[in-house]
Amino acid sequence: VQVVESGGGLVQAGGSLSLSCAASGNTASINAMGWYRQASGKQRELVATITTSTGSTNYADSVKGRFAISRDNAKNTMYLRMNRLKPDDTAVYYCKAEEKLGAFLYPWWGQGTQVTVSS
C-alpha cells in the first residue's frame, strides 16, 4: 500500500482547507485510514480516523466540531475538511493507512503535507 497526501497550504485563522489522501496498491486490505499531525518540536498526534468498512470515525478533542474526515472507497481516497482553523493547527499532516495482514495491522505513512495557519 502507498498513500500520498495533497492539499496543504497557508491559510488565515478562521479559514478552511481540505486535504486528500490517495491510496494505491493492495487497497482491498486497508482496514482503516487516518490523519495525524506533527507540529514543530512536538510528537505526532492523532487528528481523525475512519474505518473503511463501516465509515466509523474518531476525532481528537482539539478538532471535534471543526474537522470532518470522510472517504470514497471507490476512489481509494480519504479526505479531511478543516474549518475554523487556528494557529495551533499548524503542523505537517500525515495520512496513514492500516493494512490488515492476517492477524497484524501494518501502518503505511505518506510523506506529509504542510498546513500553516497564520494569525
Image: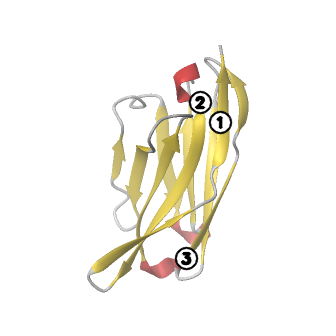
Residue sitting at x 49%, y 51%: 70
- Residue type pointed to by label 1: Val
Residue sitting at x 60%, y 42%: 92
Residue sitting at x 48%, y 40%: 68
- Left or right of 5? Residue 33 is left
**Mark 2 sits on what residue?**
90
Q: Residue furthest right?
A: 10
Could you say which quadrant of the image residue 47 lies in? top left
Image quadrant containing the C terminus: top right
Q: Residue furthest left?
A: 103
Return the x and y of residue 78 as percentages of the image width and height. 55, 57
Mark 1 residue element: strand
- Left or right of 51? Residue 91 is right
10 Å neighbourhood of mark 2: few (<14), some, or many (≥20)? many
**Mark 1 sits on what residue?**
115
Looking at the image, tell me whether mark 2 or mark 1 is earlier in sequence order: 2
Gap between marks 3 and 2 measured at Cα: 27 Å
Nearer to us: label 3 or label 2: 2
The residue nearer to you, when weighing 13 against 116, is 116
